[in-house]
Amino acid sequence: MPDKQFDYDVLYIGSGHGTFDGAIPLAAKGYKVAVVEADLIGGTCPNRGCNAKIILDMPVALRRQFEDLNGVVTGGVAIDWSQNVAHKDEVIGVLPGFIGGLLDSVHIDVIHGKGVLEDPHTVSIDGTLKTAGKIVIATGLRPNRLDIPGIDLAHDSSDFMNLTKMPKKITIIGAGYIAMEFATIASATGADVTVLLRGDKALRAFHQEFVETIISDLEKHGVAFKRETSVTELKAAGDQIEVLTSDGQSSTTDWVLDATGRIPNVENIGLEKVGVHYTAKGVTVNDHLQTSVPSIYASGDVIDKTQPKLTPTAIFESKYLSAQFAGESSDPIKYPVIPSVVFTTPRLAKAGVSPETAAAAPSDYTVSANHIPDDWYRQASKETLGDNLLVFDKAHHLVGATEVSNQAENVINSLLPAIEFKFGPAELNRLVYLFPSITSAAYGQL
């Protein structure tokens, strides 16, 4: 039950998915809750992350569909970047107010300002002290910045999504989600794009054969990839930027995106003062998302964890903590299968046991390979490339799937229940899907 010795039962530092998905149902049960936020309500994902990105990408996916159906559908498809950004702003501009309204509807106090831990039960917000029985650190991640001369000439992902005009020539430093997705968007919009990889691989957490499929396709669409190339310095060169690299070469570009990853927001929030342990990867928690200080918890991307730092993970953690705080469960967190997707064109998505894990344990798993263009349903949309790998255990339960295709995210979402609940032949035979559909095509491969 609510504890009256503190100002709040639970106080969250940060207002993203690591907070509001659990804070709202907790407050609805009668608990007194506060949310401290120094920036936009809703955090990264709604305002400058997933939501914004997918809006900017939708015309890109449509353009690819027109490209595949060339001859069946005639006429050109060009992306008006300024209109695309304006549409993005229109859609996401209402989200902070909408999320704030949800918080207000259950009487959550939203306190604007920077929250700093003072002791295990006290947070200072720009000098004002608030106490809580439990505190949740949900401060998320921010873009990494390279430590090189001239880095102030580079931009981050938020800057890219707010460009009012697409530069003619863009250089992207990095090879992760943001680098690959924004290379896809910029190229489809007409920019001359170069991607600089510090190593020889992109998207290291994904099946590399499929990653190379994406790289090859992007190269066919004009994107240049330079591997094992580190940027050593950026210099102003009139209206352009000179990019100096470790191989002694230099090139000029109109715009530089530093997409070298994201780092946890753990600095200057009082962690050291109150004894909360953390690493370069984030806040350290136990199997109840509790930090080294028993009254302080963490949720979302700021946690040092092996689970993917994605919005669905943060939502699950936030709801888990809500149930814990309300006394509805005392169990340790048990993560479900969490899917991942890269919104390139084609998409790359995965869930469950990876092909690499299966290959390393052939006595435990079998892998089925499918070539996407061979499927009649994909032929309807004239998809010309794509593959998937399905991983089964010895009882023929589907335990993992990885796909590269224009519909990869929808296929993995369709297969997710079978992976999470370990459907066997009997359960799979009971599932009757709408036909024709991407789901019926996906399950037809099992």
Image (cartoon, rainbow, N blue to C red):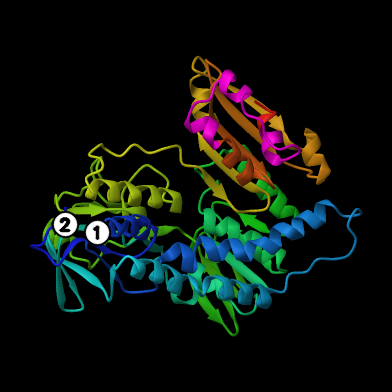
Residue situated in front as seen by the camera: 65 or 345: 65
Q: Could you give the CA–CA distance between mark 1 and mark 2, rounded to whole angstroms?
A: 8 Å
The span picked out in magenta is 416-442
- The reply to whether callout 1 and callout 2 are in contact (CB within 8 Å) is yes
Q: Quadrant of residue 133?
A: bottom left
For the point 32% across and 74% down, the residue is 38
Q: Residue 73, relative to residue 125: is it above or below?
A: above
Q: Amino acid at mark 2?
A: Pro
Question: Label 2: few (<14), some or many (≥20) within 10 Å?
Answer: some
Q: Amino acid at mark 1?
A: Gly
Q: Position of residue 121 (x, y in %)?
A: 12, 61
Q: Residue 363 at x, y = what percent?
A: 50, 14
429 relative position to 175: left or right: right
Label for residue 2? 2
Which of marks 2 and 1 precedes in the sequence?
2
Which residue is at 63% across, 73% downward?
Answer: 87
Relative vertical location of residue 349 with respect to residue 84 in this rendering, above or below: above
Residue 199 lies, with reference to residue 366, above or below; the image says below
Q: What residue sits right under mark 1 in the picture? A: 30
Q: Evaluate whether residue 57 shows in this view.
A: yes
